[in-house]
Image (tube, grey):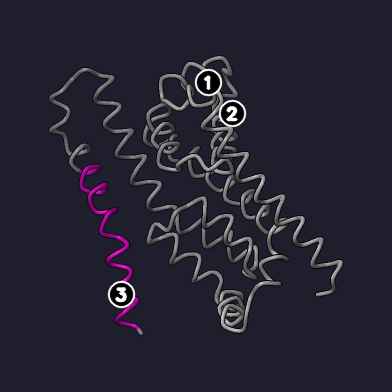
């Protein structure tokens, strides 16, 4: 990499750093924090009427890029839209956010990361290029932190479509389990019929929710047995 290219890569990396810093400051130091509850967001979405699902999806995607916790956004989506629609809107929003964060990382940070990679890191980089789908899928299934991974994968040589499909499949199970659990509890709360807490649907959703915490251990165990 020539001197001019290194300078350009360094400037873009600084841009990525400022973007991340600005995202953190925006969330922590502005009124945006007051909307980070299901009630506040629900009131805001009421004004959008028919377009509320689309607005929520865009908010979710933007929230991912601004380093808002994915579990917080997912919980609010399930609480507002219910178990099934909540799952759909959350999954679409998560995918849009994951793609946007990936491209921000790829555009602003990839060249700089490549210039810093030594022989050992380059071998890992080449490996993830060759086995990108499996690597992304595995990291998603073991609940690797969502937003850092989105930006981080952009810094690697992973192919975009390997990243896209690995993410799309990898977040399906966890997203469904979490939204189904929150949405089910929300429906019982809204109905006021506390006897419904003893229904099959509630126990099933609770079982799925508890099971989700064992998914990473199961995957790691299966993976270790294959090595």
Q: Residue at x 34, y 43 (%)?
A: 178
Task: Measuring from the top left, give residue 202's x and y in whole percent.
Answer: 21, 37
Left or right position of 61 against 41: right
The stretch of residues the image draws in magenta is 204-226
Say the numbered circle drawn on residue 55: 2
Residue of label 3:
222
Query: Measuring 48% from the left and 58% from the top, which residue is drawn there?
Result: 169
Q: CA distance from mark 3 to mark 1?
A: 43 Å
Q: What SS does tag 3 mark?
A: helix
- Say what secondary structure mark 1 lies in: helix
The residue located at (28%, 73%) in the rendering is 221
* Callout 1 touching callout 2 (CB < 8 Å): yes
Magenta segment includes 110: no
Q: In the rendered image of this protein, does residue 143 appear above or below residue 55?
A: below
Task: Indicate whether 153 appears above or below 176.
Answer: below
Q: CA distance from mark 1 to mark 2?
A: 7 Å
Of the two numbered discs 3 and 2 on the same chain, state the one appearing first in sequence: 2
Q: Residue at x 41, y 20 (%)?
A: 39
Residue at the disc numbered 1: 45
């Amino acid at each position: 990499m020539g001197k001019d290219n290194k300078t350009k890569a360094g400037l873009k990396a600084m841009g990525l750093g400022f973007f991340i810093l600005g995202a953190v400051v925006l969330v922590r130091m502005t009124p945006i924090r007051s909307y980070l509850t299901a009630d506040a967001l629900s009131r805001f979405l009421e004004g959008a009427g028919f377009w509320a699902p689309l607005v929520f999806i865009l908010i979710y995607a933007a929230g991912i890029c601004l380093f808002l916790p994915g579990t917080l956004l997912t919980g609010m989506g399930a609480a507002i839209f219910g178990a099934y629609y909540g799952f759909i809107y959350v999954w679409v929003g998560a995918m849009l956010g994951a793609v946007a964060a990936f491209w921000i990382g790829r555009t602003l940070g990839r060249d700089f990361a490549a210039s810093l990679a030594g022989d050992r890191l380059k071998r890992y980089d080449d490996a993830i290029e060759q086995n990108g789908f499996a690597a992304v899928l595995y990291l998603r299934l073991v609940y690797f932190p969502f937003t850092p991974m989105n930006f981080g994968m952009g810094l690697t040589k992973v192919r975009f479509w390997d990243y896209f499909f690995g993410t799309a499949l990898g977040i399906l199970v966890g997203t469904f389990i979490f939204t189904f659990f929150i949405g089910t509890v929300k429906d019982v709360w809204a109905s006021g019929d506390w006897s419904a807490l003893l229904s099959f649907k509630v126990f099933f959703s609770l079982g799925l929710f508890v099971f989700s915490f064992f998914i990473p251990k199961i995957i790691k165990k299966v993976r270790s047995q294959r090595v």
